[in-house]
Image (cartoon, helix red, strand yellow):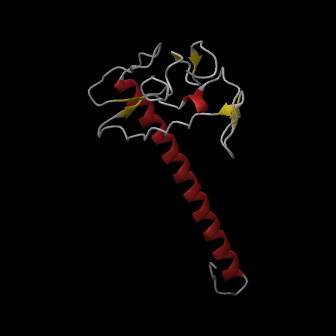
Amino acid sequence: MGPGDANWRCLCGNENYPTRTTCNMRGCRLPRIQGDVTFQGAAAPGAPAFRGVAAPPAPAPRASRPPPMGSWKCVCGNVNFPKRDTCNKNNCGNTRLTSEVVDAEILKLNMAAAAAALEFDEASRLKRELEALEMGQRYAPY
C-alpha cells in the first residue's frame, strides 16, 4: 500500500484512503509524496517544506473586473450596480440620491477651493507684474 496502512491527510485537509496515490479532493490532486502531511518524506529539491513535504502550489489570483457602466459609489465606499437604489453593504442603507448629493457637495467644495487657488495665483501674477513695471522692467513669467 504505502507508508503505513492508515488513512493519510493531504495539505488541502482532505483525508484519503491508504490505497490512493493522489489526493481525491477536486482541485487538489497532489501526489501523496507531496501532499501527505502524515508522511515524513523528503520534499522536492528547492520546494518549500511543510512538515517534511512540499507545499501545494498557490492558487492563481482571481482577475477583478470593473463594475458595470452606470454603477455608483456609496458614501460608505461600496460600489453598487446601476439597478440598485439603496446600498447593499451590511448596515449601510444609504440611497443613491444621498450619495449623489454628498458627491455634488464635495465637488462644489473642490471647485470652490480650486477657484480660490486660481484667484490667488492670478493675484500673485498681477502683483509680480506690477512690481516689475514699477522697477522699469518687463515682466517675464518664467
Find residue 84 and report its horizontal and vertical position in percent.
Answer: 30, 24
Question: Please, is residue 132 above or below residue 9 in the view?
Answer: below
Question: What residue is rendered at 72% in x and 30% in y?
Answer: 52
Question: Considering depth in this image, is 65 or 18 the residue closer to the camera?
Answer: 18
Question: Considering depth in this image, is 129 or 47 the residue closer to the camera?
Answer: 47
Question: What residue is rendered at 49% in x and 40% in y?
Answer: 60
Question: Considering depth in this image, is 14 or 135 the residue closer to the camera?
Answer: 14
Give the residue furthest to the left.
83
Instruction: Name the quadrant of the C terminus.
Output: bottom right
- Residue 49 is left or right of residue 61, and the answer is right
Question: Please, is residue 5 above or below residue 11 in the view?
Answer: above
Question: Considering depth in this image, is 9 or 102 the residue closer to the camera?
Answer: 9
Find residue 59 and report its horizontal and vertical position in percent.
Answer: 51, 36
Find residue 58 and report its horizontal and vertical position in percent.
Answer: 56, 37
Q: Quadrant of residue 74?
A: top left
Q: Quadrant of residue 120?
A: bottom right
